[in-house]
Amino acid sequence: MAEASLFHLPDYPVPGHGKVWTAVTRDRAQLRFASWHPTVRPVRGTVVVIQGRAEFIERYSETVAELRRRGFHVLTFDWRGQGGSQRFVRRGRKGHVGWLKHYEADLALAMDEMRAKFPPPYFVLAHSMGAALCLDASRRGALPVSRMVALAPMLGLSMVARPRAASRLASLLFWLGFGRAFVPGGGDTAIATKPFAGNRLTSDAARYARNSALSAAARELCVGDPTIAWVRTAFRLMARLAAPGAASEIGVPTLIIAAGQDPVVSTPAIERFAARLKTGQAIVLREARHEILMENDEIRQRFWAAFDAFIPGEDAAAPSAGEPGERGLVQRLAGGGDDTPAPGSAAAVP
């Protein structure tokens, strides 16, 4: 396990005055946490930043700084098996988790740390796998926050042509004892260090190069491709959220922001899910790829406009995301007032 500290690279400054520590889950996994105080007053609450697969705390330095300038405390952590948290395979570059309950324990610990150390109101800003886990936790009543912004949640995989067959194969290989093996063709190379041309993550060459340099320098924080067990876990999570009634069980007011050019997760699946939310909506940023927070300035400005319209520094008594007036405000700010309806309850913005 990496030391409980933050990695600093001269060209990738990590926000100063942060606190770093480790905490232990109920099943004894050690997770790396980090937090920062706001840089302005009044304090508007606490935002918990929830990563996706293969990410680590330092990659969100720009986002952390932007949240602090908005008056928020920021809390974040590394999932088990990645970043500076404990890994459970000898070959540490494997992106591995054994069971869905392990991620649930990680998120439960994060919520405990949030309530014990930071002031309300509480908000979540989650990406991809982390967003899907937060949606499921809300469905189960295990996400004690006022509002959630879910970026490109992992509700379906665009890169898998036959998901049912892939899910069955992953389960078969898992039960045959291959859970800790890489997926076929997988290896140690971190996705963020692969060439920019044709990448799935962002259209912003400068931010991609910066993240690539960070991943190359902080090799101990990176993982490569996932294991069979991780794939099985991902399909089980997606199946749970695809069940009839799952979306309507989510009680936390939620804004889902999808990427129109996402080659990783399925934007149509996100739109179908959003259409069934009782206290939420979705907007689609047409030109964005999977990592919206790592995108170009224009796309990020639309994201922050939607975030600022949706996340008030108020208590949970604020109007829900499903109220028409608020839906219009979010869409106008995200799209500059030129919104085009997309399938379901989503709005597609340029």
Image (cartoon, rainbow, N blue to C red):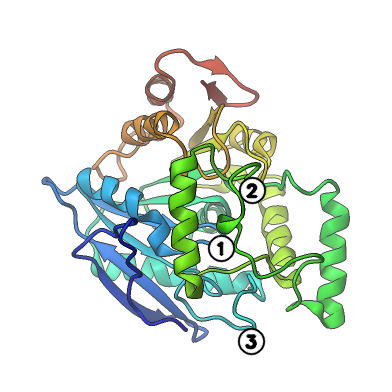
User: Nearer the N terminus, badge 1 or badge 2?
Assistant: 1
Q: Which mark is residue 246?
A: 2
Task: Return the residue nearer the eye: 293 or 115.
Answer: 293
Q: Tell me how far mark 2 sits from mark 3, CA to CA.
A: 36 Å
Residue 278 seen in the figure: no
Q: Is residue 251 above or below residue 240?
A: above
Q: Tell me how far mark 3 sits from mark 1, CA to CA.
A: 17 Å
- Residue drawn at the location 24% of the way across and 42% of the way down: 314
* Residue 273 on image: x %, y %: 64, 39
Which SS class for mark 1? Answer: loop
| Mark 3 surroundings: few (<14), some (14-19) or many (≥20) residues within 10 A | few
Q: Tell me how far mark 1 sits from mark 2, CA to CA.
A: 26 Å
- Residue drawn at the location 41% of the way across and 28% of the way down: 298
Q: Which mark is residue 90?
A: 3
| Mark 1 surroundings: few (<14), some (14-19) or many (≥20) residues within 10 A | many
Which SS class for mark 2? Answer: loop
Residue type at mark 1: give it: Ala
Residue type at mark 2: give it: Ala
**Disc 1: which residue:** 54
Is residue 123 left or right of 127 when viewed as pictured?
left
| Mark 2 surroundings: few (<14), some (14-19) or many (≥20) residues within 10 A | some
- Residue drawn at the location 44% of the way across and 43% of the way down: 206
* Residue 338 on image: x %, y %: 46, 12
User: Nearer the N terminus, badge 3 or badge 1?
Assistant: 1
